[in-house]
């Protein structure tokens, strides 16, 4: 047991004296008001420094591999530090004896680590894996809340039972199932990292936490745009920036007689008034402002059209650069670092979208060249670029939820329909997938276009059944006639080739008509202890030997014994008594059905 020594600059106000041994000693008063002394020596820079000791003890122990390891006990009391060193030595002995493995011993040594420090290491691991900044913030925020609410400080305190109890408590307070699943996913990811970092041994214990059923507790169900709604929405988005300046003031309905300014407000934009408001704004505003507002509307409509035509996510589109748009090959090259799944993709473009992007890129290049013409560098005019800069974003800003909702209202489209389904920016991606499915595109092709790893996500989550022509699919089913046709029934049953001679009438009144379907097969039960079906020869082709043979097949499973014969089961092979010659004797012995022919 020992305390480590370290050096520090000479404290201010310290007095230096020489003791009897000729050593320089500094004396000063610490922050706690206590007198302190230390040996003074000259540092490498020639300035005086003092030699101090740590307040806690360190212990030197020998590991299971025979190397000496210095361990910080964190104890100021020597006896307590000795007890911790003894525990370390006992763990080492258990590893040497083979009672526990080295991995288990290492995990046990991390059990007392503070969760705050462990989460900092986990955040660094996520950053090293290339996760996005937003994803890291979301994961860290959820884990911080979980740790705070459960009052867990050490790693050993974070148990699956405590996490599951907290999730159940959140469910009772109204947290959605999808949100609870996000917390569970983050905890499982944290546990996987702990296993990889050798801070947990064995299987991730958090994987046993059950997943909440999202289908019974969906709070935010998106729907897709119809073609008519999408057309009206793009038209409103194109006109609304300019139409906002042409709205007419109207009096408040609460007090029409009130002439104060606070009782007046601007009339909302509707599909019937948006064009008149845009025309009024063109008259009132100057040409420069009108041009900028019209440019803003065109760009906003093009953003929505790009999201509808490519299935890009809002964040992914905000990261697309101008150089990523290849108009010659009619595609957008999404870089791996810009995609959500960190995998690059090539997204084809429709001809109408290509024309809009071409005009948009031309306007951006013209604006860049106009700015360069006004710049002067070192007394000379700046060079005019022939192309857009490599890092130039395709769209400077992507509309948020407020702008999207205002465009919906101007188009006369309800944000929430009668079934509680919602339209938001991400619903444009749902619309892209639903339109693909409605056009008859195969599921595998739609999955590749959506860049999904699971086809269930494409078929169930991102496909709106309301846009599918289910009525036409139902009408394609065959029509059922009112009455069945006898010859069709016999043909379907396989009895059209049977002769009536094979079925004599038991009353002696002639030939018996063919029996119902399945007369060529012995009856087979669909339940345990019933016989299996097997073919039986017709009456004309049976010889004497086959007439006296009895067939018995059991369907009761018996894994412990081999199949037994009729003699073993007690089934008689003698002809049945008391039946007409044409009939077969049917006997059932527990699990065996016997057919005997006279």
Image (spheres, grey):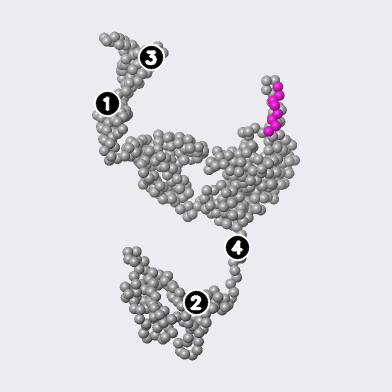
Q: Indicate whether 362 appears above or below 251.
A: above
Q: Secondary structure at mark 1?
A: loop
Q: Residues within 10 Å of mark 2 (few under 14, many from 20)?
A: some
Sequence order check: which comes first, mark 1 or mark 3? 1
Sequence order check: which comes first, mark 1 or mark 4? 1
Q: Residues within 10 Å of mark 4 (few under 14, many from 20)?
A: few
The x, y position of residue 275, in whole percent, is 71, 47
SS assignment for the magenta stretch, majority: loop
Sequence order check: which comes first, mark 2 or mark 4? 4
Residue indicated by mark 1: 1
The x, y position of residue 121, in whole percent, is 42, 35
Residue indicated by mark 4: 473
Q: Quick check: marks 2 and 4 in contact, CB under 8 Å? A: no
Residue indicated by mark 3: 43
Residue 410 left/right relative to 511: right
Which numbered disc, 2 or 4, marks the residue closer to the eye? 2
Q: Secondary structure at mark 3?
A: loop
- The region drawn magenta spans 380-387
Residue 251 left/right relative to 88: right
Q: Secondary structure at mark 2?
A: loop
Quarter containing the N terminus: top left
> Is there any visible trace of residue 415 in the rendered image?
no
Q: Residue at x 48, y 86 (%)?
A: 504
Residue indicated by mark 2: 517
Residue 471 left/right relative to 30: right
Which numbered disc, 3 or 2, marks the residue closer to the eye? 2
* Residue at the far bottom in the pictured view: 509
Seen from the viewer's position, the closer of residues 180 and 448 is 448
Gap in angstroms between the C-alphas marked 1 and 3: 28 Å
The x, y position of residue 377, in whole percent, is 67, 22
Which numbered disc, 2 or 1, marks the residue closer to the eye? 2
The x, y position of residue 252, in whole percent, is 63, 46
């Amino acid at each position: 047991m020992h305390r480590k020594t370290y050096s520090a600059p000479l404290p201010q106000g310290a007095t230096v004296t020489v003791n009897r041994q000729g050593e320089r000693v500094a004396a000063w008063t610490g922050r706690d008001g206590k007198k302190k002394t230390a040996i003074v020596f000259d540092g490498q820079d020639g300035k005086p420094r003092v030699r101090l000791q740590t307040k806690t003890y360190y212990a030197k122990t020998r590991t299971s591999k025979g190397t000496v390891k210095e361990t910080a006990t964190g104890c100021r009391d020597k006896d307590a530090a000795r007890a911790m060193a003894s525990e370390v030595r006992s763990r080492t002995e258990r590893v040497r004896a083979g009672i526990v493995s080295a991995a288990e011993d290492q995990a046990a040594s991390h059990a007392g680590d503070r969760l705050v420090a462990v989460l900092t290491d986990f955040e660094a691991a996520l950053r090293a894996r290339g996760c996005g900044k937003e994803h890291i913030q979301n994961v860290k925020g959820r884990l911080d809340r979980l740790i705070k609410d459960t009052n867990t400080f050490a790693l050993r305190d974070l148990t699956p039972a405590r996490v599951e109890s907290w999730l159940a408590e959140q469910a009772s307070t109204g947290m959605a199932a999808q949100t609870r699943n996000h917390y569970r996913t983050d905890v499982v990811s944290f546990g996987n990292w702990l296993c990889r970092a050798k801070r947990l041994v064995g299987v991730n214990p958090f994987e046993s936490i059950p997943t909440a059923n999202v289908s019974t507790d969906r709070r935010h169900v998106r729907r897709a745009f119809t073609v008519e709604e999408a057309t009206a929405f793009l038209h409103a988005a194109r006109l609304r920036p300019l139409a906002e300046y042409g709205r007419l003031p109207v009096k408040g309905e609460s007090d029409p007689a009130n002439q104060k300014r606070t009782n007046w407000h601007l009339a909302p934009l509707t599909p019937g008034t948006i064009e008149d408001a845009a025309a009024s704004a063109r008259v009132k505003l100057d040409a420069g402002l009108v041009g900028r507002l019209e440019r803003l509307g065109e760009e906003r409509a093009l953003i929505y059209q790009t999201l509808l035509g490519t299935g890009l996510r809002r964040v992914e589109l905000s990261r697309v650069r101008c150089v990523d748009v290849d108009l010659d090959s009619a595609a957008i090259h999404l870089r791996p670092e810009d995609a959500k799944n960190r995998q690059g993709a090539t997204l084809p473009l429709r001809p109408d979208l290509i024309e809009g992007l071409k005009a948009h890129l031309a306007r951006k290049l013209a604006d860049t060249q106009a700015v360069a013409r006004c710049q002067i560098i070192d007394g000379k005019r700046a060079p005019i670029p022939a192309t857009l800069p490599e890092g130039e974003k395709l769209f400077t800003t992507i509309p948020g939820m407020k702008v999207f909702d205002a465009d919906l209202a101007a188009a006369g489209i309800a944000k929430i329909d009668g079934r509680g389904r919602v339209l938001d920016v991400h619903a444009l991606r749902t619309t892209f997938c639903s339109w693909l499915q409605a056009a008859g595109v195969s599921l595998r092709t739609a999955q590749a276009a959506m860049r999904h790893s699971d086809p269930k996500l494409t078929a169930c989550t991102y496909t709106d059944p309301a846009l599918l022509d289910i009525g036409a699919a139902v009408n394609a089913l065959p029509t059922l006639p009112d009455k069945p046709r006898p010859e069709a029934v016999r043909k379907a049953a396989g009895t059209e080739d049977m002769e009536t001679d094979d079925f004599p009438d038991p009353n002696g009144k002639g030939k018996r008509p063919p029996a119902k379907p399945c007369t060529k097969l012995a009856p087979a039960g669909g339940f345990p202890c019933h016989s299996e079906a097997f073919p039986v020869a017709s009456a004309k082709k049976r010889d004497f030997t086959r007439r006296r043979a009895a067939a018995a097949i059991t369907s009761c499973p018996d894994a412990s014994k081999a199949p037994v014969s009729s003699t073993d089961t007690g089934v008689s092979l003698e002809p049945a008594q008391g039946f007409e010659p044409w009939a077969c004797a049917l006997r059932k012995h527990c699990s065996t059905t016997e057919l005997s022919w006279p």
